[in-house]
Image (cartoon, rainbow, N blue to C red):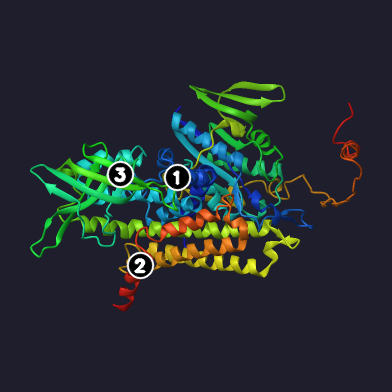
Amino acid sequence: MKGLNIAVCIKPVPDPAYYDKISVDPKTKRLQRAGAPAMLNELDRYAVIRAAELKQQHGGSITLFSMAPDDSRETLLEAAAYGADAIVLLSDRKFAGADTLATAYTLSEAIAARGPYDLILTGNESSDGGTNQVSAQLGEWLQIPHVLHVRSIDYHQDHFVVSAASDHGVNTYEVTPPMLCGVTRQVAQKQYQTLRGIKYSTRIPYEILRAADLGADEDRIGDAGSPTKAGAIYEPPQQKEVRMLTGTADEIVEQLLLEIRKAGVLQEH
Amino acid sequence: MFEFFSEEQKLVRKTIHAFVEDTIAPFAKQWDEQDTCPQELWPKMAALGMIGSFIPESEGGVGFGLTERTIMIEEIARHSAGLAIAFMTNDITIAIIQDFASQELKDLYLPALLKGEKIGSFAVTEWTGGSDFSNQSSTITARDDHYLVSGQKCFVTNARFADFAIITGVEGTEANGRNIISAVLVPAEDEGFTWGRVEHKIGMKSSTTGDLIMKEIRIPSWYAMGPAGSGARVALQTIGRYGRSAMTAIAVGILRGCYEESISFAKQRIIYGKPLSRLYTAQSIIAQNRAEYEASHAMLYNAVSLQGHDRKYLPRISSAKLFCAEAAVRAAKRSMDMMGSYGLLDEYPIGRYLRDALAVIPSGGTSHIMSIVAARDALS
């Protein structure tokens, strides 16, 4: 094999420092993110860092894929500065309202069109949606082996050795390419982009693909391709009740413990 | 605010901001209290490409311009003005070597400097004062194939731990009696090289400042920075281009610190049963901090973007240094006023910002010298 051809899916997500600026449109039930600046999804950062390490060890190239609005360039360049060779942005109003299934389908169409890739990496989940579904769905659309909760990925001659967390410990798999991994932050050490990487990131090919460019099935993209429909969204009422406890310190502690147990926080032993 | 940054420049700020928040901000108070410069950060900064970022890619640098370097220094100074001046001084030595050194000397020093394995110092000032440049008593005496260097320098940043000093001194006198000032590199390990007293400054304590004593240090003739008489050009060109912009960036970093800390305090401090930020007096202070920060930021980056393109760069950066340094002192003082007695506590960084801001004024040219440069240009 002449190096590893790696695809990394990345997602701009709202900066948690501005979560108070995010609202939900009561009609469309979609997040209104305009008040919050975008940042690179943190687990995607680890995916790109590990991809860059694998490229350094084995040669090859890295292409970033992202389904995001046109104004996402800065976030994509931030990811590319770790060592990507090309960026493909999937951006079209027709993609709007996509649930995880439609998102995975759209990404799979672009990856299949630009591939083949030996390894496809995604963050295990995004900090805004947190569904944990896109990685597996993408693997299914591409019909390739996929492993989630990945803690380490190495490549040996003709196969990947992948360790992934499970409820019962850590499982290790040997997988021949192509494969997909949804990675956790254990997959790489956090790094900063180098200034040289930043400089190159603005010079690599940057392609924007619209729905028409993909030739995708329009019934499977965006809102039309999304079986998930948001139900009622409401903010639970917050009620505060203040009750003064009186008595000696010991009596107050007893009353306090009783109230905490009644609230279900502490169990009787 | 200056808003015309390129994509690269925005990414540089974002990356260095993250690095500073993780690596510098949590320790800045400790370095200040211990009066120590964190030399261990040099390899880390070098790994990112921060050190000597203006050196062309073909020679091991990143090939960035003055604006990117200024962004980095502002970001460092947001939390540690002391480290920022240590960083900028090291960068000055790299710029001098790049612009004036022989190829052999470049080969000997630049790779190690760019890896953060060596740290440089720049020793110009003597007891006669930094602005009285030609009145130096240090001597650089030419022999057949070497120089003998003697004298004493003061206020040397990175004293005690720098691996070398680039120094200026008198190499002879012209027919009209004026001193011929030259510049040479002197390795710290050479016989006759001694670090003298260390100064305990009120501000920028995360950098070391001290004396350098030179007693007949013998260095090869190819350690010279340009031909005899290049000393003034070496010093003034480099300080004008890399030093003054950096000191202005440090002032802007301190201003940003004052602005952000005053907002944070005003929101958290409850007085008369409500946040301090609800009071007009606090709002007025925050508004003044904002106005001076935004004006300073615009002046700095506007001037820096002119470097190399406009002959007015020097008076513009001098005006910017004059305004930003004095504005940083004002912002720190008024933020302390807003905080009341809390402003006096080391628990809050605002006192450190005031000490740092005061230390910016004499570094790289006092406000009076900046006024002279700006006024001469305005009146010409």
Q: Earlier in the sequence, mark 2 or mark 1?
A: 1
Residue closer to the observer: B17 or B36: B36
Between the residue at mark 2 and the residue at mark 1, the CA separation in whole angstroms equals 28 Å
For the point 69% across and 49% down, the residue is A222
- Residue wearing tag 3: B196
For the point 28% across and 55% down, the residue is B125
Quadrant in which the C terminus of chain A appears = top right
Q: Is residue B282 left or right of residue A49?
A: right
Q: Amino acid at mark 1?
A: Asp
Q: Residues within 10 Å of mark 3 (few under 14, many from 20)?
A: some
Q: Secondary structure at mark 1?
A: loop
Q: Secondary structure at mark 3?
A: strand
- Seen in the picture, residue B79 relative to B362 is either above or below; the reply is above
- Residue wearing tag 2: B370
Residue closer to the observer: A130 or B278: B278
Q: Amino acid at mark 3?
A: Gly
> Where on the picture, by quarter, is residue B174?
bottom left
Q: Residues within 10 Å of mark 1 (few under 14, many from 20)?
A: some
Is any atom of residue B228 visible in this view? yes
Q: Amino acid at mark 2?
A: Met
